[in-house]
Image (cartoon, coloured by chain):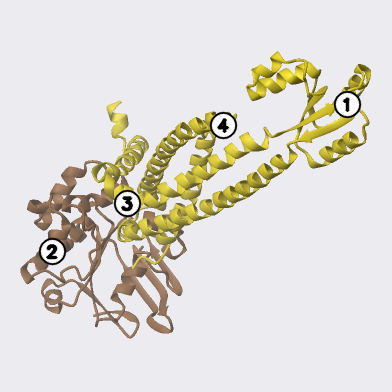
Chain colours: A yellow, B brown
Amino acid sequence: MKKLFQHKYLFYKLRFYFKHHLGCFLSSFEVPIKSPLKFIYISMPIILGILMIFTFFLIYKNIENNLYNNTQEKIIIFLKKNTSDISVNKLRKIISSRDHIISVKYYTEIESLKLYAGTNSRNTIIENFDYNPLPKTIVILKKFNNISGEKLYNFLDKNSDIELYKTNNVFLEKIRYIREIVFQLSTFFIFSLIALLFLIINSFIKSEVFKMKPEILIYNLLGARSSFIRRKYIYTLVIYLSISFLLSYVALQGLFYLFTNSTIIILKLYSVDYVFLNISFVETLFSYISIIIIMLLMAFYEINKLIKSRIL
Amino acid sequence: MFMISFNNVCKIYSGNKVLFNTNLLIDKGEFIFLTGSPGSGKTTFFKLLSGLEKPNKGSILVNNQNIVNFNHDEVSDYRKKLGIILQNNYLLEGETTLENVLLPLKINGNGDTQNKAKAVLDLVGLNNHANKIVNYLSEADKQRVSIARALISGPEIIIADNPTRNLDQELSRKMIEILIKLSKYGTTVFVATHELNLVRELNQRVFNIKNEKIIPA
């Protein structure tokens, strides 16, 4: 076995190949471990860039989750006093068959009063059934949609059994408008920041490669193949970017924790139903792999350009 | 069969002819002094021989292979067989003498590195400086590190462009004698120099570059 490993070519070359990989990998940690402040100084733009992208992505994601998918229009219909149960059932059926309807609930006068009392914390009202100003009521929940909404309003306007109806569509319209603005802004920022991040990474690679220039020239002069020369620098860049990514992720988790903990208290005060979504493992992995792949392509291009340039 | 042959080699830099229709035949194990006035084309000749530059015309055969047609990786593999000593040394200034000397072996993936390094450093008289950072060495010592680095991998061809530039007369002579000794073991050695006294004293084959041609002196 010992003889096999002493063999000049295959085993020795293999041993050398892996040893060189290991050596390059370990030497990449030299700066982050020995002088972490220097490392943070070098990688700060990348850390901030990734952190900003993640932050805007979380804003985007949470807006989509909480405002886009969960917005429901609520229409409260007050029926006329003399509306019969048959007419009510017929009306319910017609409304239920319309587009984007989620639920149609019917409340008698007393149920309406109880509902009103319950939502407004005025239980004393229930004790006085003799005077009930509330009529029979139908509460419709539907997906907020302008076209189906208009059709439904037309129908409700023409229906003779309906005294009056109220809808929160103006409020939802405002919310939608705000959501669209924030949505577009965060999309714009995400893409701008991604472009900016790649510019930062590109200039980072260029400056690192420029620093390596004398070393690369010597390796080239001594007959090192491109793959051999690239190995050390590629490892260094991958390790730098991975640590920067990790630091950004940790900072993001810190910010997310602080933000959600402080905001949830306020949202609870106003009884707003809100779910904060964190960045998922798949999203994190996808971003990491994408950044690494693009960085590798850039680094390959820059280092190859230098290797293939005139040496002396 | 000659080891190195330059056949009608032309090298022109932006209209300026450096070598024109140059022919040269060198045998294995020869020791060649290359002389010529500054700017005559000695460095260009070395660049062509080491594959750092390609000629505008002609072929350069080394061990019957035309190095002009080599791709980047083939040139790299070819350069592993060379020992190159250039005027500017090209050393890793932040690394130790030993690390610099071991660099070719690291690139080639050769074994028994420590013993070889020790022997070569001993040969050039730098054993005491093995663990010193190159940046802190004198120019003469740096020159010797460069020579040691060129010798360590046992190259087939040694190309030395003014290797004695920073050395005193005694050390210069010693270094050239080492190279002559190596040529006796089969290494082909090219030494470009301006020290004509040394050339005369050592009585080796001399070529002179003049009027874009390499001619025996």
Q: Of the numbered discs in the image, which one, if any, rests on residue A270?
A: 4
- Marks 3 and 4, how far apart at CA: 43 Å
What is the distance, in whole Å, between disc 2 and disc 4 at their CAs?
Answer: 88 Å
In this view, A279 is above or below B88: above
| Tag 4 near tag 1, CB within 8 Å | no
Mark number displayed over residue A80: 1
Report the amino acid beneath label 4.
Answer: Tyr
- Residue at the spot 44% in from the left edge and 55% down from the top edge: A200
Which label lies toward us, 3 or 4? 4
Mark 1 packing: few (<14 Cα in 10 Å), some, or many (20+)? some
Inter-mark Cα distance, 3 to 2: 47 Å
Look at label 1 and name its amino acid: Lys
Does mark 1 fall on the same chain as mark 4? yes
| Placement of the C terminus of chain A among the 4 image quadrants | bottom left
State how far apart marks 1 and 3 are (Cα): 72 Å
Identify the mark nearer the N-term, 3 or 4: 3
Q: Position of residue A131 (x, y in %)?
A: 77, 19
